[in-house]
Amino acid sequence: MATSIFLAKYFGFYFLLMCVLYLLKPNQYKTMVTSFSESPAAITLGGVMTLMLGLFLVMIHTVIVADWRLLVTVLCWLVFIKGWCLLACPKYGMQLGKKMVGKKNRVYFMLAFYIILALVLLYFGYCDRSQRWM
């Protein structure tokens, strides 16, 4: 349970901070994503680092239960899958990065989604006291 709470806080703060960064400096973020998506070396390095982080997360947290901890497990697996996909299909990662930056409505939808997800995770990390005894 302690690992689930820690990871809920970790993912919650990460998503929230990344959204705030984008809202404060959208042009800088767009430039960064564009230059990253045009560099095969950056895609490969990002894929290796993401795969290593994802493998670590999957190894320490694979909790399959019918509560909020399943959300944390799914996020861990998504990090692992993203790293694998960046290494297995780098051209797709490059195309996806370019598409996301070009669509303003899509970016704002993703921002809203990640802010809500961050708040839900932070709630379970800090405020939910219903299962602290486990």
Image (cartoon, grey):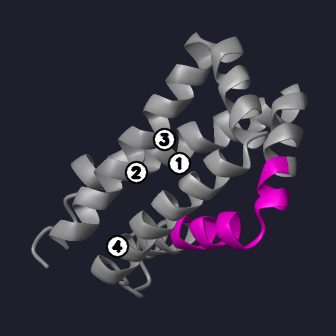
Residue drawn at (42%, 68%) of the image = 52
Q: CA distance from mark 1 to mark 2?
A: 9 Å
Residue marked by disc 2: 11
Q: Amino acid at mark 1?
A: Leu
Disc assigned to residue 117? 1
| Marks 3 and 1, how far apart at CA | 8 Å
Check contact, mark 3 vs mark 1: CB within 8 A.
yes
Pointer 4 residue: 56
Whether residue 65 appears in magenta in the rendering, the answer is no
How far across and down, in percent of the image, does residue 34 sit? 77, 31
Residue 25: x and y, percent?
Answer: 60, 12
Question: Where is residue 67 drawn, in percent x and y?
Answer: 41, 76
Mark 1 and 2 residues: CB-CB less than 8 Å, in contact? yes
Amino acid carrying label 2: it is Phe
**In the rendered structure, which disc, 3 or 4, sits on the residue that comes first in sequence?**
3
Q: How many marks?
A: 4
Disc 1 is placed on an element classified as helix
- The Cα–Cα distance between marks 4 and 2, rounded to whole angstroms, is 14 Å
* Tag 4 and tag 2, C-beta contact below 8 Å: no
Name the residue beneath numbered marker 3: 15
Which of the 4 image quadrants contains residue 23? top right
Question: Is disc 4 in contact with disc 1, using a CB cutoff of under 8 Å?
Answer: no
> Which residue is more in the foreground, 113 or 30?
30
Question: Disc 3 marks which amino acid?
Answer: Phe
Assess disc 4: are there few (<14), some (14-19) or many (≥20) residues with their C-alpha within 10 Å of its C-alpha.
some
Please tell me which residue is depicted at 23% across the width and 47% down the height of the picture.
Answer: 126
- Rendered residue at 55%/37% (across/down): 115
